[in-house]
Amino acid sequence: MSRKLILPIIISTLGGFLFGYDTGVINGAQLYFKDYFDFSTAEQGWAVGSALIGCIFGGLGAGILAEAIGRKKSLLLAAFLFSISAIGSAFADSLFNLSIYRILGGIGIGLASLLSPMYISEVSPKEKRGAMVSLNQMAIVTGFLVVFFANYWVGNHLSASMVTGEVSTESLSQWNIDEGWRYMFGLEIIPAVLFFILLFFVPGSPRWFVIKEKHNHAIVALEKLGYSNEVAQQKVKEIEDSLEKKESSSWAAFKGMGFAVFVGVMLSIFQQLTGINAILYYGSSIFEALGNTAESAIFQNILIAVVNFAFTIIAIFSVDKWGRKPLLILGGFIMATALALLTYDIYTQQFSLIAVVGILLFIAGFAMTWGPVTWVLLSEIFPDRIRGIAMGIAVASQWLFNYLVSQTFPMMMDKESAVFEMSNGTFPYWIYGVSCIAMSLFVWKFVPETKGRDLKDVRQLWIKKHKS
């Protein structure tokens, strides 16, 4: 792949990076702002989960915006919202203000979560498409990795330099409660502004230009991606031929694709019912419950981020080799096993290395399978004319269940609740483990393999799947 093609792909993955940063920053910040504002568990859940309300609307709106104004302009809007959210969250003085700016950031996440993989899918060669779309997941986990290091730096080193008088565990914790969480949010402004600026150097999607019958713009975009004028004209003709011209609108193109949309929605829902974001959002609280201080719990989160990063690399090199379907089935059973280990350790009140192994194995299983592969499939399984709207429906479903998981997890882990006492604090892990098994069976039965297929063949693939 040429440099002219890989650079726009890398720039577009900054949307994934900010997706990871913005969702990961809450993990460390919520340890402190919950005490600053004296939140109840329900208020803490809303402060964490409010961004996901924005994600739902962002996911729904992304499909409409992607079709109306294009992938690039929609990503510019996402970058702008990330910037506003970073500044506003850093200066929030109430639950209302914090949640408003988190919702704005959530809209940006919802937009980027759909648009970045969509753009990458549409400009990548079919034999490299899985790996290239997986780069977006790599950017997401890189965002998590960077923000966990940033949270650790703020919570331990910056706080030590800002504390006046004797530096102690208590003084560090108090500074983080008063000020540290604001720095954690505010640092996001750096990658957000960088993303906004670099997007001006990215060409628009050639596929979108052809769909809008702007063939000259499509040729120019392809030339900016490194193709000669002759090859660009040929590719425009191929894209044009792949579109169902008899369909006058995107809604008409939905005919016969209801099952494809259903599968996309279920993949999105199952990805969240693994409980991945309970771990990623509340990992610090989980480690703290295992007997660690808040500051050391933030450090242990780095282990999660490193494992997440390392196994996403494995996914990039395996998704176009092993295929999408085998990875998803394998991942479900790996995560179910990991959750069984975590559940056993917590239920028996051992709080030992078994719990840590369970958490890290779970992250590894998700990172190399359901994390990236879900996004690859969502970018592949819908025909051109419905891709934006169908992905919007699927992504909105994903964020809705992300919100439900993040909102209910602290309530189920409330030591005063009946489910906590009944299960010794393992109830949510039982739910997530059963979901992991169910989703592997769902993939085995209903999800087609899309490895190596041209995007223009997707409709025929679903017709064959429906008949089989």
Image (cartoon, helix red, strand yellow):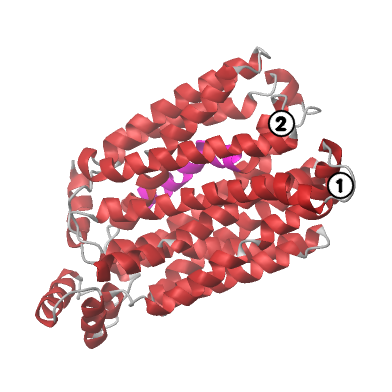
User: Camera-side residue: 309 or 111?
Assistant: 309
User: Camera-side residue: 190 or 368?
Assistant: 190
x and y, in percent, of residue 319 in the image: 27, 43
What are the residue bounds of the magenta stretch?
261-280
Mark in front: 2 vs 1: 2
Disc 1 is placed on an element classified as loop
Of mark 2 and mark 1, the one earlier in the sequence is 1
Residue at x 56% of width, y 47% of height: 402
The kind of residue tagged 2 is: Glu
Which numbered dot is residue 288?
Answer: 2
Q: Is residue 167 left or right of residue 206?
A: right
Label pair 2/1, CB-CB below 8 angstroms: no
**Would you call the spot at circle 2 few (<14 residues within 10 Å), some (14-19), or many (20 or more)?**
some
Secondary structure character of the magenta stretch overall: helix
User: Camera-side residue: 109 or 54?
Assistant: 109
Compared to residue 123, the image places residue 448 above or below, namely above
Which numbered dot is residue 38?
Answer: 1
Disc 2 is placed on an element classified as helix
Q: Can residue 43 be seen in this view?
A: no
**Would you call the spot at circle 1 few (<14 residues within 10 Å), some (14-19), or many (20 or more)?**
few
Q: Quadrant of the N terminus?
A: bottom left
Q: Quadrant of the C terminus?
A: top left
Which numbered dot is residue 389?
Answer: none
Q: Is residue 375 left or right of residue 153?
A: left
Residue at x 52% of width, y 41% of height: 305
- Quarter-wise, where is residue 67 in the image? bottom left
x and y, in percent, of residue 16 in the image: 46, 58
Q: Can residue 371 be seen in this view?
A: yes
Number of numbered discs overlaid on the protein picture = 2
